[in-house]
Image: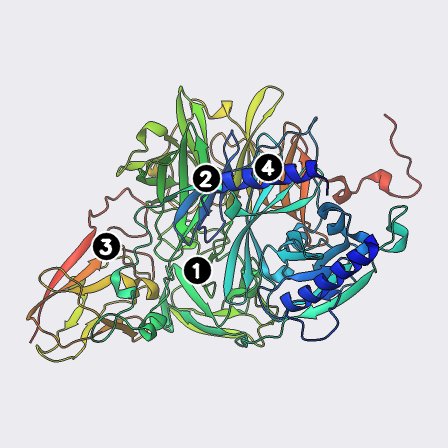
Amino acid sequence: MASMKSMRQWLALWVLSAIVFGEAAAASPDLVIPKAVGDTVQLRIPSFARGLDVDTLVQRLSIFVSDDKPCCENKLAISGQYKLKNHFLIFKPDFPFQEGQNYIVHTGMPPGDAPENYRALEFTQTVFVITRTIALPKAGVAGIFPSGDALPENTLRFYIYFTTPMKPQVALQHIKLVGEDGVADTRAFMRFKQELWSPDRKRLTLLLDPGRIKRNVATNLELGPALVAGKQYQLIVSSGWETAMGEALPQDFVKNFAVSDALRTLPDPQDWQIFAPKLGSREPLTIHFDRPYDQALLRRLISVNNSDDEEILGGVSLGDHETAWVFMPDQSWAAKNIYLHINGSLEDVAGNNFRDLLDHTVDQGSKDITNVRLPILLN
Amino acid sequence: MNSFSKLLQVLAVSSLSLMANHVIAADIKYAGALEIGPDGTLFVGDNIGGAIYAFTLPARTAPEKPTAINVANIDVRIAEVLGVGANAVEINDMAVHPVSQEVYISVTRSVGANAQPAIVRVDSGGTLQNIKLDALQATSQELSNFPDNSPSLQARGIAGPPMVKDLVKAEMPMSMLAIMDIEFHNDELFVSGISNEEFSSTLRRIPFPFNGKQGETSVKIFHIAHDQYETRAPIRSMLVKNIDGKDQLIAAYTCSPVVLIPLDKITDGAKITGNTIADMGNGQPIDMVSFNMQGHEFLFITNNSRSPQVISVAGLQGATAVLDTDFKRGMKFDLGPDIPYGPVGETIMFTGSSLQIDLLNEKYFVSLTRDTKTGSLDLESNFTFFPNRLHNLIAESDFPGVPTPER
């Protein structure tokens, strides 16, 4: 009989799928749920439904992100691709299922929704989660630059380092500049369509509005400059800001600082003190600056070259709150003549670079400097 | 399955594999600023890879008549479709396809330490669809001179080539350019951006189709409200219009001058001064959208801390450029006599905060709006001539006992 033959075929396929999908148990489950990142969800299609095409069958299988709200009437299903293979409907999400996230698998349709003359697949809800193998770092602020406790009135930029990526687009609800009177200045920072995160999403760049900088002005209505010399301020990253994975910062992170006069002279290596190392040694090459420079730019805009203009490799560390730059060579110093190669885009903490000050009231020309090349003689 | 459908299936599969030979898998690392050309090419700014991608979108038809698209809690809906919690989704930009009138939204999807770019399309029925970027034909243009990741960031070994542990220890590049606005005009792209490290702002001009060439121009402006010359201020939003007989870039800057830059001055390596013709006042412009009303052209400029500005393009004709010599010294505030300055049109009512806006069709804007009452982020369509949702407004006739006015 035809049905006996198809019964045997069905059994064979059933065994085959059990092997193919790695199920150790004797019975193949109707629903295979992911156990690792990259796994798919697989729903066995019973024989009565096997005549149906993929487009009809996909309505029977949906996966949702699970949260504390009831599922799933007002939610959209996770986007992915469906295919039929060996009587399994396989769902592969567009982005892999991730560790530590709860998901809900919906199968079948409630009997009331089934079309006529058609037996509904069983309607089930199954929750799954892929166990975390990588622990998440604890939420926290790792540090803020400029790191000094005295900053100029026209400080342009802060870098805030976090231990883990943070929830985006709420930064300015959780970062405050607070004056001596305890009042938060909510207009101190520039807001762009996109927040200025680093590629690893753990460092936020905050720009103070250059328009809020005090100049020698006849009138100074209401709003005033964001930072005033002689006063004390706090930059506060407040608790409650959630990470991208939903953990809230447990406490406020406070940076206290005093404000000194504005920096309005062009950076110039003539104002630097350079301590040359001894020839043949692995002593560091050290520069003491006349002012704090931008922490991120110091790490990449100064290099050390030999007289053939090849870079001498080594490690850079910053000291004294970004007023010192220390270079430790990988190998001993081999030649007497070395050159400091400084990119003219290097900025101090007020945004002044080698070409021009950040702003000027009168139309001043810029210096035409791409790079500065400073010869240094080893001892 | 009968033999006819089997044949169809075979044909479908073989044509797919033919297409596969022409598909370029996009190596895009970030989906930021969006611009859709008149033929439907989707331009995407990749801040991390430092490039502009051009995707060929499959052809789609326009709706029969101008339709409004409204999706409440769009950020939550996008997160659901992308399979993550709402905290893990950052919306970067939004653009409307000029032919199909569908909305494209670029997103960063964070998962632990990693993030993936995503683009979600909302169709005229309000259905969300994740766009599989690696299934689209794409070309790309790397942006020159950025980031300046000098060799000191590369891994190195103590004696000899770097070993695996040295590669792991190597610093990850931290700098990137946030591409803020991309404007397509006459087979060219104008690109503005701001670095997350050095405070610099180059205006780039790139021909399309990409041929490897690009130009960089430095623009200095006199900023009226700040009372200072700025050589590195970032352009927040821009459009090209024909003003005083030539094509000019209209650029909106922070706090917030309106500057005209003739296209013929935007050449590679040039350091030019833009023509400041107006200042809208304090606050930070977000988007600049061109629309028509009663046969006239207008600009609709949103701002993150004030109501939108509607500027007549005709009013920009013959506008005078100003410099520091035209003003007394001192920062200018909204309450002072100088601000707003120039042909800035009118400030209009807009309920809620628009984070992203574009023209949907001849009747509607579509906006990602933060609702002031509920805090939700909604994709909402508003009439261009009165961009407000009625549910946000209270009128006399909402009170019990007051009759609804007859019309």
In the image, taking residue A146 as reference, residue B357 lies left or right, namely: right
Q: Which amino acid does label 2 sit on?
A: His
Q: Mark 1 points at which residue?
A: A199
Q: In which quarter of the image is the N terminus of chain A?
A: bottom right
Q: Indicate whether B170 appears above or below B276.
A: below
Q: Indicate whether A67 appears above or below B210.
A: below
Q: Do the residues labelled 4 and 3 touch (CB within 8 Å)?
A: no
On the image, the x and y values in percent for residue A336 come to 6, 71
Quarter of image, res A302: bottom left
Badge 4 marks a residue whose secondary structure is helix
Q: Indicate whether B244 appears above or below A351.
A: above
- Rounded to the nearest whole Å, what is the CA distance between mark 2 and mark 4? 18 Å
Quarter of image, res B138: top left
Is the residue at mark 1 from the same chain as the one at mark 2? no
Q: Name the residue under label 3.
A: A344
Q: Name the residue under label 2.
A: B22
- Rounded to the nearest whole Å, what is the CA distance between mark 1 and mark 4? 43 Å
On the image, the x and y values in percent for residue A182 come to 54, 69
Badge 2 marks a residue whose secondary structure is loop
- Chain letter for mark 1: A
- Rounded to the nearest whole Å, what is the CA distance between mark 1 and mark 3? 24 Å
Q: Are marks 1 and 3 in contact (CB under 8 Å)?
A: no
Q: What residue type is labelled 1?
A: Pro
Q: What residue type is labelled 4?
A: Leu
Badge 3 marks a residue whose secondary structure is loop
The mark closer to the camera, 1 or 2, is 2
The mark closer to the camera, 1 or 4, is 4
Q: Which amino acid does label 3 sit on?
A: Gly
